[in-house]
Amino acid sequence: MHGWPVTLPDDPAFSPAIIKDETPLGVGLTIWTGACTGLNNHLLHRRIGSLLSGVEVSALRSDMQMNLAGLHTPDKAYGDAESRQFLSRLLSHYQQLCYLNWPTATPGEGVLDRDAIALAGLDLLTIRDKLEVSLAEALALADGAVIPTVDQLEQIFSDDVELTSLLTEISGPEVAELIHPLVKFDLLAIGSDRGVSENAARNIAWRELQLAARSTVPHHSATRQKVRDALDRLIAREDDPA
């Protein structure tokens, strides 16, 4: 997904940005068309309306916005100290959003890559013995059904091994559902209750789904309903005083 940042009327506005007079928010918005970048769905909260039509998007991409009603350039142009500082802050914030990814193949979030650990000479029994866990727990780790903790990774691998080289991202239909904007507010609530980041809340929800798949959730359940049920269980635990 690609997007342009927009700012409110109280923020500085200057060319080459474009102002859209009528918007779903009821106020004009400044569209920074020079800062188009890719964004992940999990950054979105909710749909508040359509800001631009397909014709307007095409016109802005081709720099033909002056032919469209309701779009105009700001009176001020880029160049003074205020506009340089504002644009620098805007682009820096937008760049930070671009790098907020989930899932990632990082310690504490990625699962073991079966091919990579095989090349590293690790088998199921070795993982079991190093971690002193049951064979079933070792199998779940080796199969990528459980996210290993950082401590577990350090126990399994030697100091000279780059841990990220032996991990891969979690995958599957549940992952697609967990980055859908519809579950954003529930994940924020779970993260707030537990004092963890939004990404960590997604990891908690994914682990809940793996447990449910091996126990209470019927195999015929639709993926979206499975995710909804898992989030409801996690939220219910927040409300439980015990």
Image (cartoon, grey):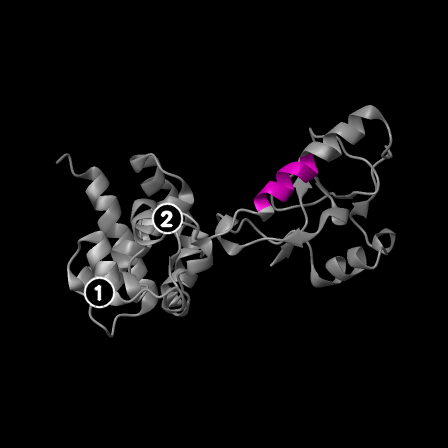
Give the residue type that dot 1 points to: Leu
Q: Callout 1: 10 Å neighbours few (<14), some, many (20+)?
A: some
Label 2 Cα neighbours within 10 Å, binned few <14 / some 14-19 / many ≥20: some
Q: Which residue is mark 2?
A: 108
| Number of numbered callouts drawn | 2
Q: Position of residue 135 (x, y in %)?
A: 17, 63
Q: CA distance from mark 2 to mark 1?
A: 22 Å
Reply above or below: 159 against 177: above
Horizontally, residue 120 falls left or right of residue 6, namely left
Q: Is residue 168 visible?
A: no
Front residue of 132 and 78: 132
- Magenta stretch, overall SS: helix
Q: Secondary structure at mark 1?
A: helix
The N terminus, quarter of image: bottom right
Q: In the image, is residue 95 part of the stretch drawn in magenta?
A: yes
Is residue 78 inside the magenta stretch? no
Give the extent of the magenta segment: 90-97
Q: Which label number is shown at residue 125?
A: 1
Query: In which quarter of the view is residue 111 placed?
Result: bottom left
**Are discs 2 and 1 less than 8 Å apart at CB?**
no
The percent coordinates of residue 32 (x first, y second) are 74, 44
Rendered residue at 39%/51% (across/down)? 109
Tell which of 210 and 176 is nearer to you: 210
- The first of marks 2 and 1 along the sequence is 2
| Residue at 17% across, 55% down | 133
The residue that appears at 85% across and 34% down in the rendered structure is 78
Kindly state the secondary structure of the residue where label 2 is placed. Answer: loop
